Amino acid sequence: MDYGLVVVDDTDAHRDLLREAAENASGTDSKLLLLMLLDEAEYEHDIETLESIGNVENVSYGEGTILEGAEQDVNEIAREVIGDDFDIEWDVLVDVVEEDERARAVVQAGADNDCDHAFILGQHRSPTGKAIFGDFAQRVILNFDGYVTVATE
């Protein structure tokens, strides 16, 4: 592995996944791209909320405020999980996507950044849920140009 992509969120399962990716990267002297995917509907709601707060405070909060906050959150998670235990470098990417576009976003981020390994969490879904929404992990595995490590919650 030269450059691994890790889907990151603020959950214990994602922290465990990041630790595994960091161990792998440390053993191969690799770098990591930490990808946080924000749900588009929640993102738009947060923008409206910030605009309302800004109107009351007479301050302008741009869309970048949410993205910058998410990037800071990812860096904080990385510092907590990776800390001094692993001597690796990481980059952060935040993307806003619809729920059904998450797999495509992971594959695209990997391709755009020349990542050769992806670390993702598989979702526990019923057969009906998989039929309607597709399976995130399966779509990443089938479309990612490199190795994919899937952990479960």
Image: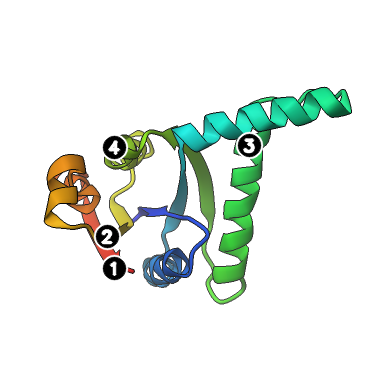
Q: Quadrant of the N terminus?
A: bottom left
Q: Quadrant of residue 28?
A: bottom left
Secondary structure type for disc 2: strand
| Kind of residue sitting beneath label 3 | Ile
Q: Quadrant of residue 145?
A: top left
Compared across the picture, whether 52 is left or right of 117 comes to right
| Kind of residue sitting beneath label 4 | Asp
Q: Which residue is at a point 61% across and 34% down the rendered structure image?
A: 46
Q: Which residue is mark 1?
A: 152
Q: How much space separates mark 1 and mark 2, taking CA atoms?
A: 5 Å
Task: Answer whether residue 82 is visible to the viewer in this image.
Answer: no
Q: Which residue is mark 3?
A: 66
| Kind of residue sitting beneath label 2 | Gly
Q: Quadrant of the C terminus?
A: bottom left
Secondary structure type for disc 3: helix
Q: Nearer the viewer, residue 58 or 19?
A: 58
Q: Which residue is at a point 43% across and 63% down the rendered structure image?
A: 14
Q: Is residue 121 above or below residue 109?
A: below
Q: Which residue is mark 2?
A: 122
